[in-house]
Amino acid sequence: MAHRPKRTFRQRRADSSDSESTQEPFAEPGAPGEQADLGPAEEGLQSGGGRAEAAELPRRALGRGRGRVWASSRHAGRAAPRLDGGSDVPGDAGQRVNIPDAAFIQAACRKRELARAQEDYISLDVKHAFTISGMKKNTEYPESEPDDHENIIPFTMKPQTLRQKMAEKTATRNEETSEDSEEDKKYQDIWEQQQMRKAVKITKGRDVDLSHSSESQTVKKFDASISFPPVNLEIIKKQLNTRLTLLQDTHRSHLREYEKYIQDVRNSKSTIQNLENSSNQVLNFKFYKSMKVYVENLIDCLNKKIINIQEIESAMHALLVKQAMIFMKRRQDELKHESAYLQQLSRKAETSTNRSLAIDEKTQWILEEIESRRARRRQARVLFGNCTHQEGTSSDDELSSADMIEFQKSQGDILQDHKKIFEDVHDDFCNIQNILLKFQQWREKFPDSYYEAFISLCIPKLLNPLIRFQLIDWNPLKFDSIGLKQMPWFTSIEEFIDSSMEDSKKEDSSDKKILSTVISKIIIPRLTDFVEFIWDPLSTSQTINLIRQSRMILEEHSTCENEVISKGKQDLLKPIASRMKNAIDDDVFIPLYPKSAVENRMSPHSKFQERQFWSGLKLFRNILLWNELLPEDTLQELGLGKLLNRYLIIALLNAIPGPDVVKKCNQIAACLPEKWFQNSAMRTSIPQLENFIQFLLQSARKLSTGEIRDEVKEIILILVKIKALNQAESFIEEYHLDHLKSVIKEV
């Protein structure tokens, strides 16, 4: 290990500026209390210690909190050069460096600490401590680049020993503690003084008047220099009497004004009453106001009840639609199963002589059910003495006992709810006659304003819910259903219109259109719903009842010709024609079997074919019953073109000529409307009957060659009835039937 060379020292010359060096000596570690001379080689380094000491002094002053300022004035005139050749002090070398004292630095640190403490967060920077002891190390002089072995490089002339450093730290800590306690006490006193000032200021503002008055009173009370005038009771009494007189006069004037106001109010009320009793305008205003209030209440009532009416109406309609769908589906299912059974029976008969046929249980049950209903109808016809009935012309609309009980129960529940709708409403708001009487009074008293307000257009809308309420249990397809003329709403509207005709001076009174508007807007849409969803065109009773109601609606009230009636008529007739067309396509089925299968009149094939033919003929008759309502071209297209020529004629061509065929032809001719053949100059029938005429001539030729000759006359009579006179004459001349010429001459 190399030995450190021995260094030579020289005694430093004493200087007045180093007077404090005796108190705090700087020495090398290992040589405490010893001060040696520096060698020439190290003089430059030691002389640079003045700058280092000047830089170190603020740190020590901040750490110890003392008020001393150290500076090296020994080298003020000449600054020792630095090792790197730079200047020791920035700026001019002879300029004095102003170093702040410890109090200034501590105040700045505390100011910064208070500013930092006002924030709402705790700084995450660990370099900034909130204690005074930590602030002396990290706050003011952060180190940018720490040394290899120490964070702070001490620039001192002589390093301290370890014992001196420990003693210095202990003294510094004691001084800091004492100074901190003094500072804390100082700030505590300042804070208390501020709080006291605030309290005094608030209290002073509230009690300043009170204290002032009390002081003044106190002064006046105890001020002997103030003299009061002598007290005279007469003067006081006189003043009080004067004051009382003034108050009494004021009260009397107020009473007079009050009485005047009361009299003015009485006079005003009397004037108003006199004006109301004598002025026609006021009477008119009263009437119009009462009508306005009445109409508003009526509208509010109907708006609340229309929801219940719609619910009951929908429930009844759904119940009737369900019943109609049951009948329609049952008829179509039975027709399908019976036809399939007969076809299977025909195939079995062709392949084997054994007539026993195995069928499924469902088909067997359906066939038995059909036969049981037919047997019950035959028995009923025998009891009523109807022996001319043909199989297949019955409606077959019987319900089972269970279904009938369920239907009646549901209908009874709906009608029970129907009665409860207006049970809590006064008659003036639910009775159509009372409502019309209100408007009749208006029409009689003020006819001009009545017609100017177009009340005739408003009445149908007001009566709409009430009329629908009365039509809930109305079924136009039932024979015992009440007619429209017998309904209360119908008679009330007719009376209202009749009184309008008597009171009105106008010939074309608008009130005449009320009934037609009601029928077009309310009755026709309801009747259309029955046609589209409930009416069965194969039912003769339903068709007759529907025609009766429709004829009354479309004919008896078509006298008021306007666009409303014309549109309502088209809205009703169009669904009627569409429903009959669907019935022809879906419900008419006449099978064709070999003659061997139908020769026996008691065979199932012959019976089924006969029933289906008479069912189609029944629909043909029901369609032509509309001849006075539907247009002729529509009826001829449906009845003759689609049903007669497509189904009935084909079935007649497949039948065996004889009296039965002539009977069927007579029934077809009887269904034809006489209106089509009223033209006396007509010698040829309508084109749609050409196929029927040719079939009649063909049947007459076959019958004339045989023994049956009476039926030929029947055929000639049919030709004459349908105005096929040219064909009848040609046939008579061809077969020399001179005895039948008289039939043609009678026409």
Image (spheres, rainbow, N blue to C red):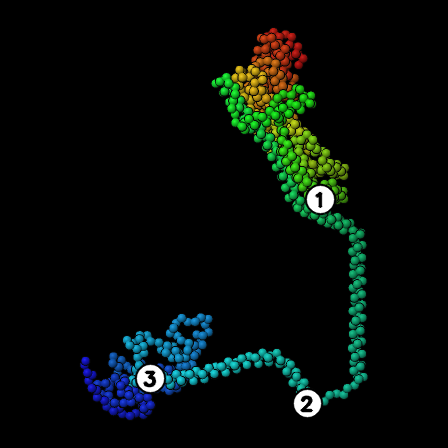
Task: Using the image as rendered, state which of residue 481 and residue 319 is in the foreground.
Answer: 319
Give the amino acid at mark 3: Lys
Picture coordinates of residue 623 (x, y %)?
61, 25
- Mark 3: give few (<14), some (14-19) or many (20+) Cα within 10 Å: few
Instruction: Please identify the quarter of the rendering in which residue 503 is found.
Output: top right
Mark-to-mark CA distance, 3 and 1: 112 Å
Image quadrant containing the N terminus: bottom left
Q: Residue at x 80, y 65 (%)?
A: 259
Frontmost of labels 2 and 1 is: 1
Q: Which mark is residue 423?
A: 1
Frontmost of labels 3 and 1 is: 3
Q: Residue at x 30, y 92 (%)?
A: 15
Image quadrant containing the C terminus: top right
Task: Using the image as rendered, state which of residue 533 and residue 456 is in the foreground.
Answer: 533
Taking 712 as reference, is 376 above or below it?
Answer: below
Q: Name the secondary structure under disc 3.
A: helix
Q: Name the secondary structure under disc 1.
A: loop
Mark-to-mark CA distance, 2 and 1: 94 Å
Q: Residue at x 43, y 74 (%)?
A: 116
> Which residue does the numbered mark 2 point to in the structure image?
223
Picture coordinates of residue 734 (x, y %)?
58, 8
Give the amino acid at mark 1: Glu
Frontmost of labels 3 and 2 is: 3
- Mark 1: give few (<14), some (14-19) or many (20+) Cα within 10 Å: few
Upstream in the sequence, badge 3 or badge 2? 3
Taking 70 as reference, is 592 above or below it?
Answer: above
Picture coordinates of residue 132 (x, y %)?
41, 79
Would you say residue 464 is visible in this rendering? Answer: no
